[in-house]
Image (cartoon, rainbow, N blue to C red):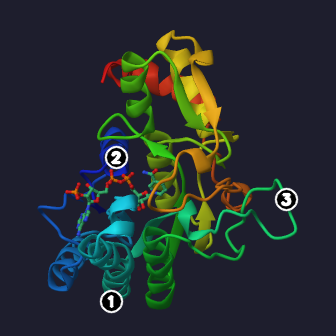
Amino acid sequence: MVTGAGGALGTDLVRELTASGERFRAFVRADLDITDAGAVEAAVGDWAGGVDEPAVLLNAAAFTAVDLAETDADAARAAHAVNADAPGLLAAACARHGARLVHVSTDYVFDGSGPEGRPGAGYEPDDRTGARSVYGRTKELGEQRVRDALDAHHVVRTAWVYGDTGSNFVAAMVRLAGQRDTLDVVDDQHGSPTWSADLAAGLVALGRSDAPFGTLHATGGGATTWCGFARAVFAELGADPERVHGCSTDQFPRPAPRPAWSVLSPAAWTAAGLAPLPDWRDALHTAVERHPELLSR
Ligand SMILES: NC(=O)c1ccc[n+]([C@@H]2O[C@H](COP(=O)([O-])OP(=O)(O)OC[C@H]3O[C@@H](n4cnc5c(N)ncnc54)[C@H](OP(=O)(O)O)[C@@H]3O)[C@@H](O)[C@H]2O)c1
């Protein structure tokens, strides 16, 4: 069962489950608002009661307007309801009906200064969190609600996700490449671009696995900066990557603070027997091959 099926990740979860012949039910927001406790209880109960094996709920629903949550009180309340409270509702319903939950979280739960005492290393799942944004704090709370309500859970933190639907960094760079001669892009934030199709495949594999319950990290392999990511998009376009100039975060202030270090270690993921997600650069090339429209939006 998939919630948030209309989003970037949700769309690819549906594709992945369809392609693998899995029996599943997917809910877009109009069909299931995950903040509605009664609707969640009915949907999970209905699905879990109708399958022989333990049902697996993949939650891809989230409030993801990071800057709006920082500046607008109504948006912050909505972010809290969707990202903090609703995962608790989903987890409690799973606990009542014997279902497992795969809940997706984010690098924004970390403060971005890097793992303590391991400079240059990726964050491990048990490294100290400390979100610096409203969005990050709501996601951090959501993780905790899941852990509190349900043993049979996987919290999977990811980062820098793009797909072939909706607005994302790749689409923004493609648009700007057509509008400007040169472009300044932040070169002091580090992370791992993650193609939503690769993440979806990983999450479905996780849902089918006997990986120990707990928190895991899953992003594209390797790491770069936003500037490096933008240059790779330009290269895929056949445009000169040198048109992209590096700038600092200070030169490009945003309402919500961004983690400077978002690199997440895949060690726990692979130790659980799961295949690492492909390297981010290879994944971008594959994404463009499979969805040429990515470069013309
Ligand atoms: N995108 C990234 O860079 C990134 C990075 C790290 C982690 N993540 C995490 O990855 C997961 C998937 O994100 P995404 O990139 O696929 O985001 P997305 O494209 O914004 O999709 C989120 C989906 O959740 C839906 N939704 C919002 N409120 C809901 C509610 N109350 N009930 C049911 N559905 C609701 C949205 O519907 P509407 O569009 O109708 O609001 C949207 O379809 C999230 O947990 C996010 O926090 C994303």
Residue 10 image offset from top left, x and y in percent: 32, 51
Residue toward you, 110 or 105: 110
Relative to residue 228, is residue 24 drawn left or right? left
Residue 248 image offset from top left, x and y in percent: 64, 44
- CA gap, disc 3 to disc 1? 42 Å
Residue toward you, 53 or 214: 214
Of pointers 2 and 3, the one earlier in the residue sequence: 2
Relative to residue 260, is residue 285 drawn left or right? left
Residue toward you, 295 or 248: 248
Is the CB of mark 2 within 8 Å of ligand 1? yes
The three-letter amino acid code for the residue at tag 2 is Ala
Is the CB of mark 3 within 8 Å of ligand 1? no
Q: Which residue is pictured at 60% across the width and 50% down the height?
A: 250
The three-letter amino acid code for the residue at tag 3 is Pro
Q: Which residue is pictured at 44% across the width and 48% down the height?
A: 200
Q: Is mark 3 on a helix, strand or loop?
A: loop
**Residue underneath mark 2:** 8
Of pointers 3 and 1, the one earlier in the residue sequence: 1
**Residue underneath mark 3:** 119
Residue contact between numbered discs 2 and 1, judged by CB atoms under 8 Å: no
Q: Residues within 10 Å of mark 3 (few under 14, many from 20)?
A: few
> Which residue occupies the extreme right position in the image?
117
Q: Which residue is pictured at 51% across the width and 26% down the height?
A: 183
Q: Which mark is residue 96?
A: 1
- CA gap, disc 2 to disc 1? 29 Å
Residue 225 position by quadrant: top right
Residue toward you, 20 or 250: 250
